[in-house]
Image: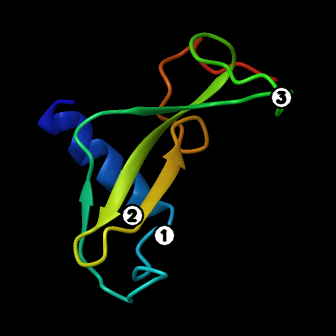
Amino acid sequence: MTQEEKEKIIKVLEEKFAKNPCPRCTNQQFSLVDGYFNQAIQQDIKNVLIVGGPSIPAVVVVCNRCGFISQHALGALGLLPQGEEKKS
C-alpha cells in the first residue's frame, strides 16, 4: 500500500465520520494496517472456503492501545477500482 493510498483511505474514513474513539478502551489513536484484507463470504457453515469465492475487500484499523481491530469495506467507502465491486 502506497503512502498516497493510505492518505486517501484516511481522508475517506474521516469524511465518513469514522473518527470515534475505540469502542473497547476509548483511546483516540489508531493505525491503518499496511495492506488490504479480504473477508470470505460463506453460504454454508459446514463447508469452510479456503480460496476463491465471494469476499469483502476491506482496510483494517487497529487501536494503538488495546489492539481492537475494525474493518472498513472498500466498496462502501467508494475505494474499489471500477469493475471490482460484485453483488452477492
Q: Mark 2 packing: few (<14 Cα in 10 Å), some, or many (20+)?
A: few
x then y, percent, for residue 13: 42, 57
Residue at disc 3, secondary structure = loop
Please name the residue shown 21% across and 30% down the image.
Answer: 1
x then y, percent, for residue 71: 49, 51
Q: Badges 2 and 1: C-beta atoms under 8 Å apart?
A: yes
Q: CA distance from mark 2 to mark 3?
A: 38 Å
Instruction: Residue under label 2, please give it.
Output: 14
- Numbered mark located on residue 46 in the image: 3
Please name the residue shown 13% across and 38% down the image.
Answer: 3
Q: CA distance from mark 2 to mark 1?
A: 5 Å
Q: Badges 1 and 3: C-beta atoms under 8 Å apart?
A: no
* Residue at the left extreme of this rendering: 3
- Numbered mark located on residue 65 in the image: none
* In front of the other: 62 or 73: 62
Q: Which amino acid type is marked by label 3? A: Lys
Q: Earlier in the sequence, mark 1 or mark 3?
A: 1
Instruction: Residue under label 1, please give it.
Output: 17
Q: Is residue 27 left or right of residue 75?
A: left
Residue at disc 1, secondary structure = loop
Please name the residue shown 82% across and 23% down the image.
Answer: 88
Q: Earlier in the sequence, mark 2 or mark 3?
A: 2
Above or below residue 59? Residue 47 is above
Q: Which amino acid type is marked by label 1? A: Phe
Q: Which amino acid type is marked by label 2? A: Glu
* In front of the other: 20 or 39: 39
